[in-house]
Image (cartoon, rainbow, N blue to C red):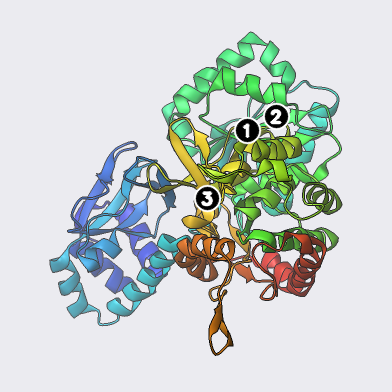
Amino acid sequence: MSEPAGLPVIELSYAIELLSKKLEIQSTEAEQLIRLAKLVRLPRGDTLFEQGQPSHHFYLLLQGQLKGQRFRPDGFQDLALSFFPGEMIGELGFFDQAPRTVSISARRDSVLLEIDQTALEQFGEFSRSVYHHLIRMLVSRFKRELGYSGPLKQHQFILFQSFVRPEGFGMQAVEGFQSAMARHCELRRWKQLGDVTPPSSVSAKDWVVEMIETEPLEVLDDRLIEELDCMVVMLCASTLNDSRSCDLLKAQLKSADDDLPVWFVLVHEAAWVEQSVVQRIHANFGSGFKLLHVRRGHHSDNARAARHILGLTLGLVLGGGGARGFAHAGFFQALEEAGVVVDSVGGTSMGALVGALISSGRSAADVNKALAISFKKGLPFKLTDYWIPKHGFVKSKAVDEVYQKAFGDSLIEDQPIPFFAISCNLTTGNQFLFEQGPLWKAVRASTSIPVFFEPFMAGRHVMVDGALVNNVPVDCMRTRGARKILTVDVGLEEDITAHMVDDSSVQMPTMMKSLMRVIELGGIEKSRQAKVISDLYVQPSIEKIGLMEFERREEIVALGYEAGRKAIPDILALLHKTT
């Protein structure tokens, strides 16, 4: 066999087999495509192309792994992708003759085929079916651009290191975590990378995970980083008192840099998240890792940690909608009764408020209780909290006190269930994603109805209700890694109307109703997109509920509960779906 595109015989055989399978073409067609294309070898860390560059080629990844990043004009990264062998890269821009929408670089040493217009036309003459397969792959990529997750890698390498004490609850947590991992994959445990042998047969489960369990390493060498898919570190409060452990972890994080995802699984001796420990971890190690919590007595924490690391999480997205957002509490009650556990939660406006309560680990009953306390007689404000508006009808101090009372001084990163909230940054005109910092401030910013509430100030930035920009933030949940997304939308595409009272007068909506509707319409396109990219989209029957009818809380909660009960069979089917 000859060596088209400069590939050695062994690599050529592998490339032909890969392309035949992924493109659903004959091996002779795959070999012809390789002959017409240009071979590109991309060392780890090198860039294939930058966002904004012209799209003169597209690529097929044969070996290695690539990462894609998309940045907004303000520098905020709003999309992160991973590419594995057999995937196409850059084809959307190539066929549309549009600039690159993401920057692509090599996470590992990679080999790609580069295809230009000439090569594609020549291959089209050889294989008439090629365009059918390219269209199919284009549709798949378009879904990912909208927010769909990419394919799961079926053979993963994970470095696992434990810094917890070898007795007591710490070791129980380690064993519980590894058992949870084994329930989701074929888990093979090794002492070092060199011990790993190829699987003897194809597993009936979805994929194989090679877990390399070592004593704490002094350094992560390049070969280890190149082979690994992620590093998992289990630690506890006592770890922070051991200077050697801290020094080792700092050195490892520096070695990993951006090339290796790192998970810290923090084991808590208590049944709650120890806030002071979280603060010390960030003070010691910065933010170059993702943090998960395992609490004593909460067996679901280990399972949630395993799903996050394996990329199997269920994300719950809760949309904004004024008083209609009480329906989220009823929906959560239905989930709890059915034994459905969510792994991440995010929301906008009232969805952020209810989502924050859920993220704290509260039961459905406690979520309802917290809402009942805050909204006992409708909106939680006294007559003296209102004034002639300069910045808003309700004084900032009154709004702040409501949320401070509900959430205290807890931080987003303290929550056992990962959480985010969306706010609109009036200063920059962009959405702002709250992923860390005081929980009450995130909810305060996300629910700050312009004119009605005084805006929330984050430094010099003016934050208002997130519904203006993204009322149902499914896309944000995707970029945070959720594999399956359950969305509850309490907004309406068609809402307030005017009607004739008699021949001479018209009943118009109130100023507050009109204002709330304007805010809701700001994110209407995102809401429409959410229907498409959610794995399961639910809209409770809230058509007869007004945006400001907070006094109807119990009725609205019941509507959410009813919608949740009806959706349970579909939710369970989604959870059991393996693709």
Quadrant housing the C terminus: bottom right
Q: Is residue 404 above or below residue 127?
A: above
- Dot 1 amino acid type: Pro
Q: Earlier in the sequence, mark 3 or mark 1?
A: 1
Toward the bottom, the furthest residue is 503
- Pick the residue in front: 414 or 105: 414
Residue 184 horizontal side relative to residue 65, left or right: right
Q: Nearer the viewer, mark 3 or mark 2?
A: 3
| Type of the residue with mark 3 | Val
Q: Is residue 128 visible?
A: yes
Q: Disc 1 or 2, which lies upstream in sequence?
A: 2
Residue drawn at point x = 71 percent, y = 73 percent: 570
How many angstroms separate mark 1 from mark 2 (CA)? 6 Å
Q: 495 or 441, which is in the foreground? A: 495
**Residue 438: image tag:** 1
Q: In the image, residue 189 lies at what x, y percent?
A: 67, 39
Classify 10 Å Cα crowding around label 1: few (below 14), some (14-19), many (20 and above). Answer: some
| Image coords of residue 173 (percent x, y) | 78, 34
Question: What count of labels does the image hold?
Answer: 3
Q: Residue at x 44, y 29 (%)?
A: 257
Q: Which residue is mark 3?
A: 451
Q: Secondary structure at mark 3?
A: strand
Instruction: Report x, y in % for residue 252.
Output: 52, 23
Please say if the residues under marks 1 and 2 sit with CB atoms less than 8 Å apart: yes
Residue 444 vs residue 95, the one in the foreground: 444
**Corner quadrant of residue 240:** top right
Quarter of the picture containing the N terminus is: bottom left
- Label for residue 409? 2
Q: Residue at (60%, 59%) from the top-left corner?
A: 320
In the rendered structure, which disc, 3 or 2, sits on the residue that comes first in sequence?
A: 2
Can residue 205 be seen? Answer: no
Q: Residue furthest front?
A: 504
